[in-house]
């Protein structure tokens, strides 16, 4: 029969693992939004808006230049704005960013609940199903995630949080841990 303290320690350890993993994922999604996606938005959202505005000004002849040049610039800028907007739409950038905005806070919430459960005096009570509920919620969130994260953001988040998302596996390719052979 397992010792009650062993079970208690195992539960505490699992809460910590869930908390750490959720913190890393929340940070990775935050970094994703403020990293490359920020610059992508500048290129595919802000620049087309500026181009469309400038096109309207040139089309209206509001800059005091030759009307032929003004029409040419207006058409070129309007075309550029349309192409950039089409790229943004075809890459489904809005959906991806919305998913990142959903997942980041959801993982933060799981981390907060796991941290709180570790401090709870009820965690040793077998009727206290917080670990089961949290594990199920975490699994459901992972399964429903539609915004994959590049490994670089996970690595950066691991560094920033100080937690490893996935434990490093030792392989036979690592000779320092390979078993010695008797010749």
Image (spheres, rainbow, N blue to C red):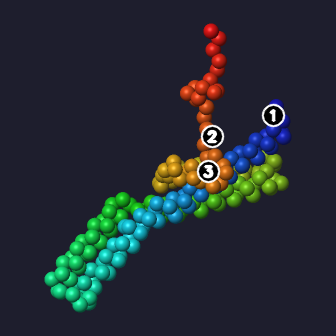
SS class of the residue under badge 3? helix
Number of residues whose C-alpha sits closer than 10 Å to that of mark 2, classed few (under 14), some (14–19) or many (20 or more)? few
In the image, what residue occupies the spot 27% across and 80% down?
A: 55
Q: For the residues carrying marks 3 and 2, which lies nearer the camera in this image?
A: 3
Residue 32 shows in the view:
yes
Q: Secondary structure at mark 2?
A: loop
Going from the N terminus, do you reach mark 3 or mark 1 first?
Answer: 1
Contact? badges 3 and 2 (CB < 8 Å): no
Secondary structure beneath label 1:
loop
Spatial separation of the CA atoms under disc 2 and disc 1: 26 Å
* Mark number, residue 2: 1
x%, y% of residue 86?
Answer: 30, 65
Tell me residue 68's x, y (percent).
15, 83
State which quarter of the image contains the N terminus. Answer: top right
> Residue 167 shows which numbered tag?
2
Q: Quadrant of the C terminus?
A: top right
Q: Is residue 90 above or below residue 8?
A: below
- The dot on residue 158 is 3
């Amino acid at each position: 029969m397992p010792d009650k303290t062993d079970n208690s320690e195992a539960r505490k350890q699992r809460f910590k693992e869930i908390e750490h993993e959720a913190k890393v994922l929340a940070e990775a999604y935050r970094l994703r939004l403020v990293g490359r996606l920020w610059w992508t938005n500048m290129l595919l959202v802000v620049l087309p808006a500026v181009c469309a505005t400038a096109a309207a000004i040139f089309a209206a002849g509001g800059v005091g230049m030759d009307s032929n040049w003004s029409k040419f610039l207006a058409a070129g800028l309007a075309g550029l704005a349309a192409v950039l907007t089409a790229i943004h739409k075809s890459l489904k950038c809005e959906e991806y960013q919305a998913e990142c905005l959903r997942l980041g806070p959801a993982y933060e919430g799981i981390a907060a609940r796991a941290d709180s459960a570790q401090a709870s005096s009820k965690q040793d009570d077998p009727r206290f199903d917080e670990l089961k509920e949290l594990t199920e919620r975490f699994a459901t969130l992972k399964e429903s995630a539609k915004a994959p994260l590049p490994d670089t953001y996970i690595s950066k988040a691991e560094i920033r949080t100080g937690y490893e998302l996935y434990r490093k596996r030792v392989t036979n390719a690592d000779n320092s841990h390979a078993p010695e052979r008797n010749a």
